[in-house]
Image: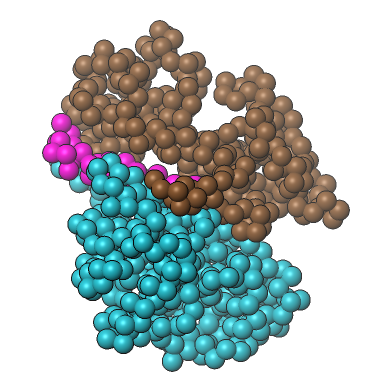
Chain colours: A cyan, B brown
Amino acid sequence: MNDSTAHVHRHRTMSKFLKLAHKFNSFYLNGLQKKECRAFIVDGIQVGLVQATVTIELSRYPNVFIVNPNSVTLNPAFRDYDERSANIESVLKEMKEKKLFVTLKGWRDECYEVRTMFADQPLLKMDRSATCLFGICNYGVDINGYVNHPQKGLCIWLQQRSLTKQTWPGKWDNMVAGGLSVGNSVIHTAHKEGEEEASLTADLMKNLQSAGTVSFFYESERGLFPDTEFVFDLELPPDFVPRNQDNEVEKFELVTATETVNRILSPDFKTTSCPVIIDFLIRHGIINPENEPRFPELVELLHVPLQSLYKKCDNLLTENGLSKAE
Amino acid sequence: MNDSTAHVHRHRTMSKFLKLAHKFNSFYLNGLQKKECRAFIVDGIQVGLVQATVTIELSRYPNVFIVNPNSVTLNPAFRDYDERSANIESVLKEMKEKKLFVTLKGWRDECYEVRTMFADQPLLKMDRSATCLFGICNYGVDINGYVNHPQKGLCIWLQQRSLTKQTWPGKWDNMVAGGLSVGNSVIHTAHKEGEEEASLTADLMKNLQSAGTVSFFYESERGLFPDTEFVFDLELPPDFVPRNQDNEVEKFELVTATETVNRILSPDFKTTSCPVIIDFLIRHGIINPENEPRFPELVELLHVPLQSLYKKCDNLLTENGLSKAE
């Protein structure tokens, strides 16, 4: 690298938002390149990624998982959705009993569908606490509850998560957020979570507006989190106060847009909820090309190509001459 | 591929919007993988891609371009922005005279900056008609002019491009759109184009709201078009009618959201303006997870990772043991 190249790179200073986008994309931007994970293959197609520490444990179940240098394949003898789901569940429950992985302490008895792309037919279901062990893409729904306040301008309702929650206890979070579990549509999940988490009535929910998705790929000590959130905006009257019904919320607070920025930049905010808030602040003009020099990059890091990620890896496996189903 | 895999893939039917997203991402989804282009390298870093047909012509100027099996490098002897710009311009003007490339017929005497990422220091400037020969990322500004009509609901102003325009003559387009040329900021370009194209007064422009970016990578017979558009929404009063001042517009029309969908799906719409409209329809809830089964994929294809595309190729060159500056 010569002097002038160094000069160019010096201009790539990261803003606070970009640093945050790198944090919630830790696996997309760093882990993925290292190629230390094995493709998780079900019915001949890749649906996830498995870390070395997880592979070691899965290899103790050769009747369920076939471990190869580049892949972990679910036994193709399991013929259908139910058989695959049951076999994986029994392994996971044994691992949970053995306390092998911290994430399984949060076993929920609530399952996520497993597939490569969102519109694909699901191949099996898996407890939501276990999907991060297999790098399965999670889907969730978020509602940005906001108020156009006569004095304070744009304000956003945030929730503090219950101190007893298994994941991110006591952290600040979006007003309403919930995972898309088996059998629930996106819109049904929005209504269900809106009622349970914040007592949003059918009347208030008439203003609910679909506004897109955010996609990112986070890695923590628990595992791998490729995540797509379906985003909704909901304008609320200034006198509305959310009230929690499911004991998963410590408290709610209505904060100004400026204060929202401070909150997401603080370590007290749930890292994986920041993309939804940043997307909201961008769509509402608070973060914009005038105050964020690397605006296009920030927007791209809110929409990383998860839907084509495993499809592409799929192709790589084929290119390398490996049989997909092995 | 076994029977059940075929079964899974059968569910990947494309909607009309997804087909359109594949069309305006023709190079991102197809061309890029073929690896038929050479990296265009300036000052040791990749800033573009050059097709074989263009490389042949550039190789006739060995004092300006150094052609290697994987790259076309601008002569590193050119020391600065001005020297690089002048040397490329003289080659391009000669090619224009020789009528070698159809795109150069549209020479504009209006330049775009050349750099890898938006926030980087520009390395040179190039006439906007020529950037597609080098796969240089273009940046533009779009204003979605919309009306919350008391009877018709959400309506959008569209323009028909002038029949005498060099590119996409007579096609339907977004209300206001313009390229980010040398010396103009995003917000300045929005105001300038708003005034010239649609007579948007300072008073109307007070409602202008930054709403994000779209990124896509299109290929046509003219060349390669990696493109990022800075998107603005502008709510307009029901009685406002845009009036063109620069003779680049045939006419304007206010159409309902439903009719907007018909327009972008028709061949009479400028392909590379569809991403901005689809993004608008998504942010305003018209296209949503209930009517678009492959919603996450559609959103991701409106934000393909252009800002990291050449950086990644950069790494590949290094990995392959090729010196970056050669």
Residue A233, placed above or below residue A102: above
- Quadrant of the rendered structure where residue A232 is? bottom right
- Quadrant of the rendered structure where residue B252 is? top right
> Residue B55 colored magenta?
no
Where residue B301 appears, as percent x and y from the top left, is 49, 47
Where residue A250 appears, as percent x and y from the top left, is 51, 90
Which residue shows up at 47% across the image and 34% down it? B26
Furthest toward the top, the residue is B98
Q: Is residue B104 visible?
A: yes
- Quadrant of the rendered structure where residue A87 is? bottom left
Which residue shows up at 22% across the image and 58% down it? A68
Quadrant where the N terminus of chain A is found in the figure: top left
Residue A286, placed above or below residue B52: below
Q: Which residues are magenta?
A: B298-326
Q: Is residue A274 visible?
A: no
Where residue B171 appears, as percent x and y from the top left, is 66, 28
Where residue B184 appears, as percent x and y from the top left, is 48, 40
Question: Could you say which is closer to the camera, residue B143 or residue B293?
Answer: B293
Question: Could you say which is closer to the camera, residue A300 or residue A185?
Answer: A185
